[in-house]
Image (cartoon, grey):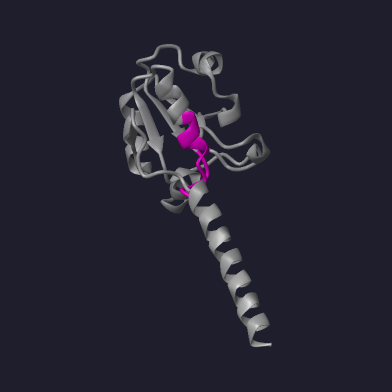
Amino acid sequence: MRFLHQLILALIGTCLLLKIGTAAEKEAPQFIEGTVRVSAEEIVELVEMHDDLVLINSRNNTEKKAPYIEGSVNLSPKDTYSASLARFIHDKTTPVVFYCKDISHDCSAKAAKIAAAEGYLNIYWFRGGIQEWQKKGYPVVQP
């Protein structure tokens, strides 16, 4: 009976570790090479400084009905490639901000990495995403 009890505890522990490991793997990285990590306040500054700033909402297509930052375009990571980037970012020196839901999602990180690999030079990455934006009281568009 004691063996069975220990086996059950071991299985529960393993399941918990697997669940924690899976969640950690999905979390956005701290930094992305070729990008500048920005906060909500810094996005406001970028909007004021650059008339040509492009905001890309990198959330998956299943989240199209979620709130977004006004003026942003929706481009999920699976739809992010050379031609789709060029459709929204007309010059590789144009400043662009990628964001998604929050730090527990890596959609914007994936999209920003693709843009960096494609040679875009002024990439800003908003790791905190729409969750940080809303938490700080900035306005959103409700679709």
Residue at 60% across / 25% down in the picture? Answer: 79
Residue 122, image x and y in percent? 34, 23
Left or right: where 93 falls relative to 83: left
Left or right: where 137 falls relative to 61: left
Decide: is 37 above or below 13: above
Left or right: where 92 falls relative to 14: left
Q: Which residues are magenta?
A: 100-111
Residue 106 on the magenta segment: yes
Decide: is 134 above or below 89: below
Residue at 46% across / 36% down in the picture? Answer: 109
Residue 29, image x and y in percent? 41, 43
Residue at 48% across / 48% down in the picture? Answer: 27
Residue 112 falls in which quadrant of the image?
A: top left
Question: Is residue 47 at least partly visible in the picture?
Answer: no
Residue at 37% across / 35% down in the picture? Answer: 32
Of residue 26 and residue 67, the one placed in the foreground of this image is 26
